[in-house]
Image: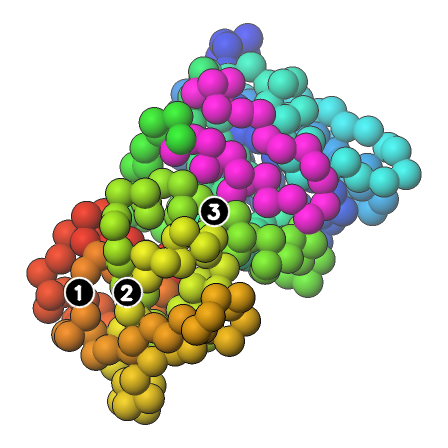
């Protein structure tokens, strides 16, 4: 157990808004983790109207009895200020050299690297951040992640199950529209990937692939030379016609079998949904991720 008064090395960042049903389990996980260095929990209450802070106060004594300093801040305005605001305040009131994010609410349409798995230095957070404080409906974690990548940040994967991902009806994620997330992702694809390709193929002639095609800017859309798929019905049709285009004649994009298509590919097929068939097909082409294809879904 770290001695009292030791400066925190890791600050766990916990924004809270009406999290009463899940806080006991959440705070128990802080108590039961196996990190042995100096640590603190920084809680910021974003105008909770339930018993969240009563639960936090109850756990404060237990946690500090185990050597984990608990810092509590917040506000009781009529309305919450949002997840981004709360995370920024929780970081500001903390003191650790490293930040570990432990949301009591999660995001569903965001990046594969979901927010509660993030661990970074305070120095890097200050370089990249802060979080967007636009409030409800703003995917602050996705925007921060893109800023991280733009500034040269990388990602290290830990191949262990380290958290329980809780998805519930009142999560902040439901305020973020799917179309909002989608367009942020499309614009990032156009910014980071497509400038390096003179032409490309969209892997998926179904709904997701066609939606991506329609979402592209005119210049990026003109780089699409084909769709590819394994669905014989789509392939027999032979093409996709973009009916909403203002061009005359309207663009007709060929639909090919994936083995007849040419890389690079933007892949709009979700992983782990075809019993491994898609992954086997992709692997059979001997392509290099990042050079010959990128995953968009």
Q: Which residue is mark 1?
A: 262
Instruction: Classify the position of the C terminus by image quarter.
Output: bottom left
Point out the stretch of residues depicted in magenta. 124-149
Alpha carbons under labels 2 and 1: distance apart:
9 Å
Residue 146 belongs to magenta span: yes
Q: Where 200 sits versus 36, above or below?
A: below
Q: Where 183 sits versus 10, above or below?
A: below
Count of picture labels:
3
Q: Which residue is mark 2?
A: 225
Q: Residue furthest front?
A: 248
Residue 23 x/y as whole percent: 66, 46
Q: Quadrant of residue 151?
A: top left
Q: Secondary structure at mark 2?
A: strand
2 and 1 marks in contact (CB < 8 Å): yes
Q: Residues within 10 Å of mark 2 (few under 14, many from 20)?
A: some
Q: Residue at x 83, y 47 (%)?
A: 50
Q: Is residue 213 left or right of residue 44?
A: left
Alpha carbons under labels 3 and 1: distance apart:
23 Å
Give the mark nearest the N terminus, 3 or 2: 3
Q: Is residue 233 left or right of residue 17?
A: left
Q: Which mark is residue 187?
A: 3
Q: Secondary structure at mark 3?
A: helix
Instruction: Classify the position of the N terminus by image quarter.
Output: top left
Q: Secondary structure at mark 1?
A: loop
Q: Which mark is residue 74?
A: none
Q: Front-most of 154 and 189?
A: 189
Give the mark nearest the N terminus, 3 or 1: 3
Q: Is residue 267 something that shows in the picture?
A: no
Residue 136 belongs to magenta span: yes
Q: Front-most of 228 and 273?
A: 228
């Amino acid at each position: 157990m770290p001695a009292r008064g030791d400066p925190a090395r890791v600050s766990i960042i916990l924004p809270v808004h009406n999290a009463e049903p899940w806080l006991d389990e959440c705070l128990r996980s802080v108590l039961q983790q196996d990190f042995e260095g100096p640590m603190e929990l920084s809680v910021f209450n974003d105008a909770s109207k339930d018993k969240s802070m009563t639960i936090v106060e109850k756990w404060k004594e237990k946690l500090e009895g185990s050597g984990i300093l608990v810092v509590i801040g917040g506000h009781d305005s009529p309305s919450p200020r949002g997840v981004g605001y709360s995370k920024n305040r929780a970081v500001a009131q903390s003191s650790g050299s490293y930040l570990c994010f432990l949301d009591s609410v999660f995001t569903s349409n965001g990046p594969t690297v979901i927010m509660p798995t993030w661990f970074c230095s305070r120095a890097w957070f200050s370089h990249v951040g802060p979080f967007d404080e636009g409030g409800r409906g703003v995917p602050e974690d996705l925007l921060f992640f893109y800023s991280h990548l733009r500034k040269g940040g990388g990602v290290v994967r830990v191949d262990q199950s380290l958290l329980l991902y809780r998805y519930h009806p009142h999560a902040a994620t439901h305020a973020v529209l799917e179309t909002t997330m989608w367009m942020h992702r499309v614009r990032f694809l156009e910014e980071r990937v497509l400038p390096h390709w003179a032409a490309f193929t969209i892997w998926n002639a179904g709904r997701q692939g066609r939606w991506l095609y329609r979402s592209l800017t005119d210049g990026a859309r003109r780089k699409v030379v084909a769709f590819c798929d394994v669905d014989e019905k789509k392939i027999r049709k032979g093409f996709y016609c973009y009916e909403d285009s203002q061009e005359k004649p309207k663009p007709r994009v060929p639909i090919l079998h994936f083995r007849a298509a040419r890389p690079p590919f933007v892949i709009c097929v979700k992983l782990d949904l075809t019993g491994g068939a898609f992954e086997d097909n992709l692997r059979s082409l001997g392509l290099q991720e990042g050079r010959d294809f990128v995953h968009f879904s």
